[in-house]
Image (cartoon, grey):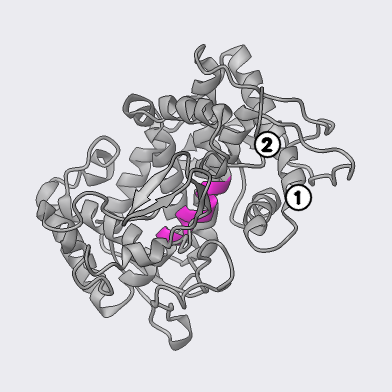
């Protein structure tokens, strides 16, 4: 019995047996050993994004807008983590831009049903491709693959009302009388693709924005020093795939999640049992909205919450319990021209104030390489680890190749 559909992410589904099954399946596919198996994907995606930004910035001589790069990074990382393959293309790739558009629009207007139908087209195709790869043994470690292999998952897959089509072709318009099927396995896919695209780019982009400020320049220096002290041999690039041993970097990440609350007002939740609070009885079935922004700026929980201070998470002196309610070779970043400056106000930075999630206003950053030779060596090391990542080009499967020590994308 299925009571919710692939239109819901796991976090937005009604609490029922279907949701419980999906949560359990996703948790199994996201445990520590499983996550470690996905790190080559993070390595590849980060490497590609860094190379692309360096190329487009002409090795730091031209300022660039980080928004499209991080949107592509989040989308392709989500797709690869969930399905084990990626869609080839640059930040201007038509299919990538279409998926970004479809996944971002439901939180903006009343066209959610239309976009959900369009989403089912590519979610169905992605799942079908993964099942083919599982059948012939060419699959890569991925979340949905682990779920499909788990005999205890017992999730329903559903059947798409749409005809098959090449994944790189334009997305067709679904028949208005056909409703996408309920499908628990697709819900996990939607969770990884949609939810990640809604939140990850906002955090990454605004963390970079803050690093361009005068205080951000100081943070960059301290972070670089901390990395150098922990990895004096320059091995941080590789070591970060296996461990987290730089407390200041971990503290910085936590402060980014607290300071930049990319979902200021959380989606509604319904209580499953009676709650007693301050002599008042709140019955089961009551709808709650959490003001996550207010929680992250609660002065009874955080000292000087309006300040961006990674130090608050060092030594466990502050932020104990729930740390937040959010969901070295590059010398530095800076916004040097007047028109390039980012908006660093945590609410005014949103280009669409009525949007459910934060969409940062456009700005540009300057990327400055501190040690070009070391950076090239690190990039070559990542490329050697990724000699055989399956990509999709024009609907056909090819293998990524390393030529002359540089990854050839496609």
The stretch of residues the image draws in magenta is 194-204
Q: Which residue is mark 1?
A: 113
Residue tagged by mark 2?
123
How crowded pointer 2 is (Cα within 10 Å; few <14, some 14-19, many 20+) is rated as: some
- Within the image, what quadrant is residue 216 found in? bottom left
Q: Hey, which residue is sitting farthest bottom in the picture? A: 338
Mark in front: 1 vs 2: 1
Residue 103: horizontal and vertical position, in percent?
64, 52
Residue placed most toward the observer, 17 or 115: 17
Residue at (42% x, 54% y) in the render = 50
Name the secondary structure under disc 1.
Answer: helix
Task: Say which residue appears at 41% left-offset and 38% top-offset.
Answer: 383
**Label 1 to label 2, Cα distance in Å?**
15 Å
Write down the quadrant of residue 124 in the picture: top right
Residue 198 magenta-highlighted: yes
Disc 1 and disc 2 in contact, CB within 8 angstroms: no
Q: Residue at x 18, y 69 (%)?
A: 303
- Disc tally is 2
- The answer to which of marks 1 and 2 sits earlier in the sequence is 1
Q: Examine the rendered structure and indicate whether residue 141 appears above or below residue 189.
A: above
Q: Nearer the viewer, residue 17 or 364?
A: 17
Q: Can see residue 147? A: yes
Category of crowding for the residue at label 1, using alpha-carbon neighbours closer than 10 angstroms: few (below 14), some (14–19), many (at least 20): few
Q: Residue at x 63, y 54 (%)?
A: 100
Quarter holding the C terminus is: top right
Q: Position of residue 53 (x, y in %)?
A: 46, 60
Residue 97: where, in percent of width, then height? 66, 55
- Quadrant (top left, top right, bottom left, bottom right) of the N terminus: top right
């Amino acid at each position: 019995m299925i009571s919710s559909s692939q239109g819901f992410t796991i976090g937005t589904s009604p609490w029922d047996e279907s949701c419980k099954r999906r949560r359990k399946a996703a948790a199994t596919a996201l445990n520590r050993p499983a996550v470690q198996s996905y790190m080559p994907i993070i390595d590849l995606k980060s490497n590609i994004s860094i190379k692309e930004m360096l190329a487009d910035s002409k090795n730091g001589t031209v300022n660039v807008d980080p928004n499209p790069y991080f949107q592509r990074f989040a989308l392709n990382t989500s797709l690869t983590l969930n399905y084990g393959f990626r869609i080839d293309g640059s930040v201007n790739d038509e299919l990538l831009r279409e998926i970004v558009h479809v996944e971002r629009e439901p939180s903006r207007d009343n066209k959610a049903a239309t976009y959900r139908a369009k989403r089912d087209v590519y979610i169905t195709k992605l799942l079908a491709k993964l099942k083919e790869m599982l059948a012939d043994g060419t699959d890569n470690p991925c979340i949905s693959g682990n779920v499909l292999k788990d005999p205890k998952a017992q999730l329903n897959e559903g059947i798409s009302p749409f005809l098959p089509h090449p994944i790189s072709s334009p997305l067709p318009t679904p028949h208005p009388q056909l409703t996408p099927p309920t499908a628990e396995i697709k819900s996990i896919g939607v969770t990884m693709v949609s939810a990640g695209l809604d939140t990850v780019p906002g955090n990454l982009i605004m963390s970079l924005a803050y690093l361009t400020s005068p205080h951000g320049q100081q943070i960059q220096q301290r972070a670089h020093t901390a990395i150098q002290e922990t990895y004096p041999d320059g091995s941080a690039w590789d070591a970060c795939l296996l461990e987290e041993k730089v407390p200041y970097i971990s503290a910085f990440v936590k402060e980014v999640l607290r300071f930049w609350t990319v979902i200021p007002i959380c989606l509604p939740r319904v209580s499953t049992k009676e709650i007693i609070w301050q002599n008042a009885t709140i019955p089961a079935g009551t709808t709650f909205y959490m003001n996550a922004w207010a929680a992250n700026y609660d002065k009874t929980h955080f000292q000087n919450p309006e300040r961006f201070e990674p130090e608050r998470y060092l030594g466990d002196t502050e932020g104990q319990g729930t740390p937040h309610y959010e969901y070295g070779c590059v010398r530095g970043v800076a916004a040097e021209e007047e028109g390039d400056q980012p908006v660093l106000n945590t609410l005014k930075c949103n280009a669409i104030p009525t949007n459910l999630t934060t969409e940062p206003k456009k700005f540009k950053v300057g990327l400055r390489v501190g040690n070009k030779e070391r950076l090239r060596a690190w990039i070559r090391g990542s490329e050697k680890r990724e000699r055989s990542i399956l990509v999709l080009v024009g609907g056909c499967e090819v293998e990524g190749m390393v030529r002359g020590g540089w990854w050839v994308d496609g």
